[in-house]
Amino acid sequence: MDNNNSIADKINGARLLIKSNFAELEVESDQQKQLPQPPLVKEAAGGSIIKLSKDFSDIIKESDYLSLVNERKSHRVYKNEGISLEQLSFLLWTTQGIKEIKGDNYATIRTVPSAGARHPFETYIAVLNSTDLEKGIYHYLPLGHSLEFIKSVDKLEDEVSTSLNGQKFAGKSSAVFYYSAVPYRSEWRYPEEAHKLILLDAGHVVQNLYLSCQAIGFGTCAIAAYDQKLADKLLNLDGKEEFLVYAAPVGAV
Ligand SMILES: Cc1cc2nc3c(=O)[nH]c(=O)nc-3n(C[C@H](O)[C@H](O)[C@H](O)COP(=O)(O)O)c2cc1C
């Protein structure tokens, strides 16, 4: 009985989380208190940097919008084909690319929307099979549209699968996009609402990934059923100020 009650409490709490409380906000935000704004992006960690191009003319295979939307689906089987740097660059640009910086470093305007332009995500990529990059974990640096090499990992395919709760198809992809949240970026402005907004924001990112994959003859599959601890460990995330919220393997289809 107690167990049932605590599950019901959890469900009620979670339902509250996805409702809007904007009409009855009581807590003063750190922004209103004029506390310093957190950095717009996570800085590079000192690894080698790979500059990315924004010339995507050679890789687009389908640009008819209605075809992209109509043909979008989740793909869990991929060809054994390496992803090129241009293809990675395209997928990074269309999901998190920075088009403009507003005010005095107040906000980034990107290829996806984000509540209050807080853009709370960092993108990591486990590169498994690439024509241009060595295997390993990379971090996207959106301010300079570049990639930073973070580390090599033994048996990366297995680590990727276990980090995604044993979803083995991910280990057979060319690369896995891992999206972490840095919640304070949103909490600074929306202390109570941030968590709902972060999840709404994440949907836009991965929808762009789906459509962008479709445009270059690739496929992806959104993954929410991942192993939080193993995934955070694989990406060197502290699990508190930054942690995984979404993942998506990509590969040629
Ligand atoms: C938020 C979210 C989480 C998902 N998590 C997983 C997952 O962990 N594993 C998986 O195989 N598919 C996952 N999917 C893919 C769905 O199963 C898929 O979108 C659904 O079956 C509809 O198929 P379609 O995308 O081909 O239209 C997820 C999709 C979304 C939007």
Image (spheres, rainbow, N blue to C red):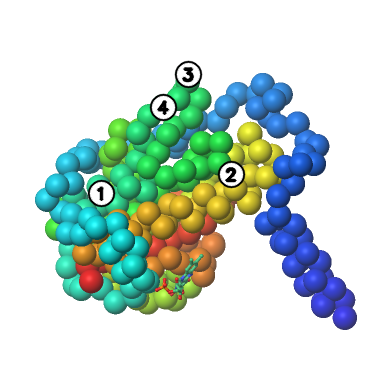
Q: Residue farthest to the bottom? A: 1
| Disc 3, SS | loop
Number of on-image labels: 4
- Mark earlier in primary sequence (1, 3): 1
The residue pinned by badge 2 equals 183
Residue 9 shows in the view:
yes
In the image, what residue occupies the spot 42% across and 75% down?
Answer: 167
State which mark lies toward you, 4 or 2: 4
Q: Which mark is residue 104?
A: 3
Q: Against 154, is 188 above or below?
A: above
The residue pinned by badge 1 equals 90
Horizontal arrangement in the rendering, residue 223 relative to residue 169 (left or right)? right
Q: Against 55, is 170 above or below?
A: below
State which mark lies toward you, 2 or 3: 3
Distance in Å between CA atoms under marks 4 and 1: 20 Å
| Disc 2, SS | helix
Amino acid type, label 4: Ile
Distance in Å between CA atoms under marks 1 and 3: 28 Å
Task: Identify the image quadrant of residue 66.
Answer: bottom left
Residue 49 x/y as whole percent = 26, 38
Q: Which mark is residue 155?
A: none
The residue pinned by badge 4 equals 101
* Image quadrant occupied by the C terminus: bottom left
In the image, what residue occupies the spot 36% across and 36% down?
Answer: 98
Horizontal arrangement in the rendering, residue 123 relative to residue 89 (left or right)? right
- Mark earlier in primary sequence (2, 1): 1
| Disc 4, SS | strand
